[in-house]
């Protein structure tokens, strides 16, 4: 345990010396009820991890296999297989550790022992990369919502046309009261994806979530 703590201190000193803010380094960061990583680099703005480090006291195939499985489980728990992950072993010299970048498709073999890195990417590079991924994710979600909204509008338009046709044929009778009810139903369907909607003289607006104070 003492050796692992010494390794952690050395790693944190190394990271802060290379531009990583102290407040961004979180020891034993809890991902969920089942998973906790040895060291996480957290973006203070979004509170999202931008790098994960798993520390092992000895460099051997067993510890490599264990760390590989752990980091894969962490990424799965986060729902983000793009977050950079690293395995760190103690070593002689300066810095007093060896660091290996866990590739996305890495197996539990010794292949990582041949991919030692001299230093992690700059903090600003990592942070900007994480921000870019978050923007891309948000844009994809926005496009998906718009696509679903468009399909929903077509379906609702089709349903209204069908009602109008049935009304002309005398199969159903659309009264002003029923028309109002239909408008309310359509509004209730659309409001969850539309920020504001005005229909039949009534205005509907989705209530935004209140931001929690820092």
Image (spheres, rainbow, N blue to C red):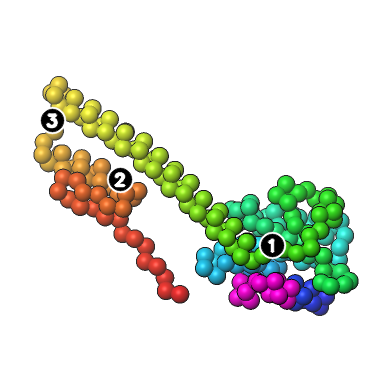
- Look at the image and tell me in which quarter the C terminus lies: bottom left
- Front one among 117 and 11: 117
Q: Earlier in the sequence, mark 2 or mark 1?
A: 1
| Viewer-proximal residue among 201 and 91 | 91
Asked whether, in this view, residue 71 is left or right of residue 94, the answer is left
* Residue at point 64%, 66% (across, down): 123
Looking at this view, is 79 or 140 the one in front?
140
Q: Name the side, left or right, on which 115 lies relative to 73.
A: right
Q: Residues within 10 Å of mark 1 (few under 14, many from 20)?
A: few
For residue 121, the mark is 1
User: Distance between the Cα atoms at labels 2 and 3?
Assistant: 25 Å
Q: Give the number of the mark in front: 2 or 3.
A: 2
Counting residues from the N terminus, which is met first, the one under dot 3 or under dot 1? 1
- Asked if the stretch drawn in magenta spans residue 13, the answer is yes
Q: CA distance from mark 2 to mark 1?
A: 45 Å
Q: Is residue 159 visible?
A: yes
Rendered view: 36 above or below 161: below
Q: Is residue 161 magenta?
A: no
- Give the residues drawn in magenta, as a range: 12-27
What element does badge 3 sit on? loop
- For the point 61% across and 65% down, the residue is 124
Question: Going 61% across and 72% down the picture, which residue do you hit?
Answer: 24
Which residue was labeled with disc 3?
173
What crowding class fits label 2: few (fewer than 14 Cα within 10 Å), some (14-19), or many (20 or more)? some
Which disc number belongs to residue 190?
2
Observer-nearest of 16 and 140: 16
Quarter where residue 86 is shown: bottom right
Q: Judge depth for marks 3 and 1 and give the one in front.
A: 1
Decide: few, some or many residues near mark 3? Use Cα within 10 Å; few <14, some 14-19, many ≥20: few
């Amino acid at each position: 345990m003492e050796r692992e703590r010494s390794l952690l201190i050395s790693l944190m000193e190394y990271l802060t010396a290379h531009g990583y803010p102290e407040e961004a380094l979180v020891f034993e960061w809890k991902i969920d009820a089942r998973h906790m990583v040895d060291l996480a680099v957290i973006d203070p703005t979004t509170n999202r991890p931008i790098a994960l480090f798993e520390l092992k006291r000895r460099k051997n195939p067993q510890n490599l296999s264990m760390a590989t499985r752990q980091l894969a489980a962490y990424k799965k728990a986060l729902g983000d297989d793009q977050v950079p992950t690293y395995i760190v072993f103690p070593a002689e010299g300066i810095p007093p550790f060896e660091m290996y970048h866990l590739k996305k498709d890495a197996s539990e073999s010794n292949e990582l022992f041949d991919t030692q890195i001299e230093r992690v990417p700059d903090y600003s590079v990592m942070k900007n990369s994480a921000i870019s991924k978050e923007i891309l994710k948000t844009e994809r979600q926005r496009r998906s919502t718009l696509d679903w909204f468009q399909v929903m509008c077509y379906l609702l338009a089709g349903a209204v046309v069908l009602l109008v046709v049935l009304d002309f044929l005398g199969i159903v009778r659309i009264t002003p009261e029923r028309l109002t009810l239909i408008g309310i139903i359509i509004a209730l369907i659309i409001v969850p994806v539309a920020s504001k909607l005005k229909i039949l003289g009534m205005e509907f607006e989705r209530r935004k979530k209140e931001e929690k104070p820092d």
